[in-house]
Structures are given as structure tokens and as C-alpha cells.
Image (spheres, grey):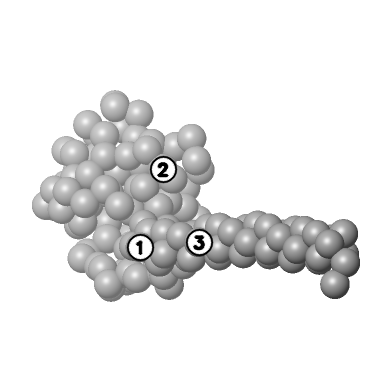
Amino acid sequence: MNPTRFRDLVSGVLIVGVVTSAALITVGFVASLVVGWAVTLHLGQGYWGRMFIPVDDPGQVLPTAQYVAANSQPDELVALAGQDWDPTVFYYARRKGLMIRGQAGLKDYAHLRTLGYTRLFVCPGSGGTPCDIVDLTAP
């Protein structure tokens, strides 16, 4: 075998070996990035996965909030009786309002009217039952 040819053969093997090891390092690096990304997504699922959970409304607040939103204007001040101190109806209806604990009577109507409230929704409990509406603008 010719020494020049042997040298060319050895340098060719070395070059192929270097290229192969560089390719293996690159493939290994990319694979580790993909695995790391997948593990991070899986471990973070408790945080970002919540937005994909179906709506859970055990207290049936959403139908009441839809009713309040449909029967009032966004800029109106409304009062809500019968829901204790739970403001979620106002949150989901996107309304500003006052929670009245217990029953509201005629003397409360006059006081609410002086404070600028226009409607009183009397919603007994939850369960999506329709609320009674008291128009506070009428004397």
C-alpha cells in the first residue's frame, strides 16, 4: 500500500469520525432539549392545564350571573339579596354592586335608592333559580 494512499485513508476515517461524533453530539443535544421541554410541560400541567378544564359550577352561580347581567346595564349599581356575602355573581355578571345579607325590606329600598342603586335582585340561594327584581328607581 502506498504511504500517501494510507495517509489519505486514515485522514478520511478521522474526518468521518469527527463528523460522526459532531453529529451524535448535535443529535444528543437536540434530544435532551426535547426531553427537557416535554418534562417541563408535564410538570407544569397543574399550572397551565387549568385553563383547559371544563367549567365547574357546583354552586350554580353562572345562571344567576347571566340573569343579573341580562337584566341590568354595565354602568348600573345593583344590589343582591339572598346570596349571603358571596360576590361571585357580581364578578361573573361584570357588575358593581352591594351584597345584602338576609332579607331586604321597604326601609332598605329607600336607603339603597339614596345610595344610587337602581335594582335589587332577590335570589334565594343557589341552583340557578330566577331572581326577583325590585326596581329601586320607582318611589
Q: Nearer the viewer, mark 2 or mark 1?
A: 1
Mark 3 Cα shell of 10 Å, populated few (<14), some (14-19), many (≥20): few
Q: Are marks 2 and 3 in contact (CB under 8 Å)?
A: no
Residue 91, position as x, y percentages in the image: 36, 47
Determine whether, in the image, residue 65 is placed left or right of residue 28.
left
Residue 41 visible, this orientation? no
Name the amino acid type tagged 1.
Leu
Count of all numbered marks drawn on residues in the image:
3
- Residue depicted at x 26% and y 39%: 98
Name the amino acid type tagged 2.
Arg
Q: Mark 1 sits on what residue?
A: 43
Residue 75, position as x, y percentages in the image: 48, 35
Q: Is residue 60 above or below residue 96?
A: below
Name the amino acid type tagged 3.
Ser
Which corner quadrant holds the N terminus?
A: bottom right
- Quarter of the image holding residue 16? bottom right
Instruction: Label 1, secondary structure: give it.
Output: helix
Residues under labels 2 and 3: Cα distance? 50 Å
Instruction: Label 2, secondary structure: give it.
Output: loop
The numbered mark at residue 32 is 3
Instruction: Give 66 or 78, whichever is nearer the viewer.
Output: 66
Mark 2 or mark 1: which comes first in sequence? 1
Q: Are marks 2 and 1 in contact (CB under 8 Å)?
A: no
Residues under labels 2 and 1: Cα distance? 37 Å
Instruction: Give 129 or 49, whichever is nearer the viewer.
Output: 49
Q: Mark 2 sits on what residue?
A: 95
Mark 2 or mark 3: which comes first in sequence? 3
Residue 66, position as x, y percentages in the image: 45, 60
Determine whether, in the image, residue 19 is placed left or right of residue 96.
right
Residue 27, position as x, y percentages in the image: 62, 64
